[in-house]
Amino acid sequence: MSENKNAEVVHATNEYEREPVPDHALKGPKKFWGMYAGEHTAGTEFMIGPMFLAGGVGVFDLFAGLLLGNLLAVLMWRYLCTPIAMSSRLTLYYQLEKIAGRKPVVLYNLANGILFCFLAGAMITVSATAVIPALQSVGIPLEVRQPNLGDTLPPGPTWIVIVLLIGAVIAFIAAKGYESVARVANIAAPWMILIFIACAVVTLPKLDATSASEIWKGGEPLVGSIKLTFWHVLFFGWCCNAAMHMGMSDLSVLRYARHASSGWAPAAGMYIGHFVAWIAASILFAYEVQTNPSDPQSAPGPMVNNAIGFAGLICVIVAGWTTANPTIYRAGLAFQGIFPKTSRVTITLVAGAVATIAGVFPAVAMKLLDFVGIYGTVLAPVGAILFINHRFAKKPDFISNYAETTGTSMNVAVLLAWLIPVAICLFDFLVTKRVWAPFMAVPAWLACGGLYLVFTKTLLRTKSA
Amino acid sequence: MIATAKAVSWSALIGLTLLPPILFATGGIEETTLKLLMLIGTVIWFVATPLWLKRDPS
């Protein structure tokens, strides 16, 4: 779970917003491998690993689920996202505008911006769990209870003040642009990966376990968690970045690919960040469960501090900060798409304020698996519209880039095909609660694509009409 | 200058970030030493790496 942190590619994604990327700006595969390797090792990985252990996942279910789930995610990037990215060489926003018209894009921007704010809020929460022990270890006497799995409300007034201060700093820096933060992220990336590995290497000998099956034993989940199986792990690995691969958000990046082989580059991020880092974080939490079985604490800061000390705290803070910052910036950009006359600084500060308030409440960070599932379920289906538009472009009777071709600002077929499955999924998530959120993204994507095909034939003009 | 900074960075990453956890896990160093070495490695990495990363043509 992450956001783009690489300075060069972030710069690049801000260019050619309403035109295809020209040949001279295309990049070779090496750039993409480097970018993706760093991009998916974020502060939130420290939250996700423990959640698998808390869900009582077994060792086979964890390893097989992650290996296959990440493979499916990589295949989505390679065979869904990359061909469309290289065919049109346009951003998701501009491509969607050509198909759907201006008005549905405004709605997409709103959903995107709000979800980005909550995601950034989770990253601020993670950073705060490390800032507290960091301040304590330099002699500042703070009495703060850290949030734990299942917590939704702020654990106390001191926590609120600390999160507000961290959020204010991050929002202010985001408002000034994120070149310097992206540079810090670039510098930190190789070191951060080793810090994750170090946490696992240091913690393993402390565990009363002689094999992996004694760490991930399976069995009953901890209080506040649901039981996780192979299928839960597989779908989470597959869909935690659904908005980026199936949802085509990474068209912004992969449209710069000179070769289709660049579409394999997300494998670096998946198998370093979403395999090694999650397992390392899970091992950290296993030690916490062993030492404090009645009330294990999942806050990343204290766990990492116990394992490797101040270097680990710096890692959690840097990982949270360097991902929260561009996320707030991108939320600001999404909102600016709706309010184009408002300055970028103002709108980024507003997005930062929303993210900070979200970060005060540990609900998003402590329910990250659910939030990430909803994030993908809401945004990914839009990618199915682009897929259908690409796949059926040369079919008789199908009007490709419908809004641009017909001059409409509202393609009703897009709106209905997107909102109907999303509304059904949100209703289940909020009211009936029968399906785990990460299971919803793929059915929503398929339903959206199917509905769009039906609606283009029933609601829209065709070439022969 | 760039070559020196690069050598310092990678030495710190390998010698003071990768190696100490392995030494700790095999009983070679104490926890306090581990934490100190990793902090020193972190500081060196963040001081030395900006000197060459931006200028590296690769």
Image (tube, grey):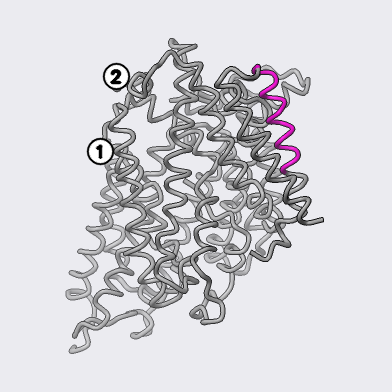
Sequence-wise, the earlier of marks 2 and 1 is 2
Is A462 located above or below residue A31 in the figure? below
- Foreground of the two, A372 or A171: A372
Q: Position of residue A409 (x, y in %)?
A: 40, 77
Q: Which residue is mark 2?
A: A220
Q: Residue at x 51, y 16 (%)?
A: A206
Q: Residue at x 56, y 41 (%)?
A: A193
Q: Residue at x 50, y 62 (%)?
A: A32
- Give how far apart the Cα atoms at labels 2 and 1 are: 16 Å
Quadrant in the picture for residue A86: bottom left
User: Number of labelled discs?
Assistant: 2
Quadrant in the picture for residue A261: bottom left
- A433 in the magenta segment: no
Question: In the rendered structure, which amino acid carries the disc numbered 1?
Answer: Trp
Which residue range is magenta in the image? B30-45
Tell me the tag on residue A231. 1
Which quarter of the figure is the C terminus of chain A placed in?
A: bottom left
Is A17 located above or below residue A132 in the figure? below
Q: Position of residue A82 (x, y in %)?
A: 38, 67
Judging from the image, mark 1 belongs to the subunit labelled: A
Residue contact at pointers 2 and 1, CB within 8 angstroms: no
